[in-house]
Image (cartoon, rainbow, N blue to C red):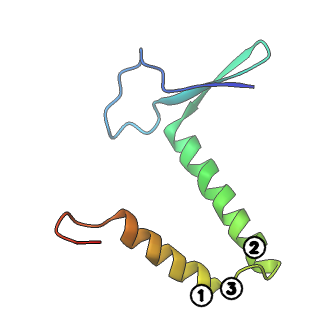
Amino acid sequence: MTLFSRNKKEKSSDKDYSATAMKMVIGDETREVSFNELVLSNNLAQQALVRLLINKKLIEPDELMEMMETVRKDNYRTPDQAD
């Protein structure tokens, strides 16, 4: 399977989530994948992974929530916030 990044020939607005995000080439077949499909696929994979980790007792739900808060703070700092 070969993946190509965003189709540069296509013009899309920031709000056009049905635009082609990438093309997948599998053998002789090419399939366009939209931003909506990528978001949904990513969301489903994350939910499945979290459920497996919790069901196998590798993490606790509270640990996940704490880490999500830590990551949110790390990624969404304002310029006036010091390290």
**Quadrant in the picture for residue 69:** bottom left
In the picture of the structure, the residue carrying the numbered disc 2 is: 53
Picture residue at 72% right of the left edge, 64% below the top: 49
**Quadrant in the picture for residue 19:** top left
Picture residue at 64% right of the left edge, 84% below the top: 61
Q: Earlier in the sequence, mark 2 or mark 1?
A: 2
Number of marks present in the image shown: 3
| Type of amino acid under label 3 | Glu
Q: In the rendering, which numbered label is found on residue 62?
A: 1
The residues tagged by marks 3 and 1 sit, at their Cα atoms, a distance apart of 5 Å
In the picture of the structure, the residue carrying the numbered disc 3 is: 60
Residue 42 horizontal/vertical position (percent): 61, 51
Mark 1 surroundings: few (<14), some (14-19) or many (≥20) residues within 10 A: few
Q: Earlier in the sequence, mark 2 or mark 3?
A: 2
Residue ranking furthest to the front: 83
Residue 76 horizontal/vertical position (percent): 33, 65
Do the numbered discs 3 and 1 sit on residues whose CB atoms are within 8 Å? Answer: yes
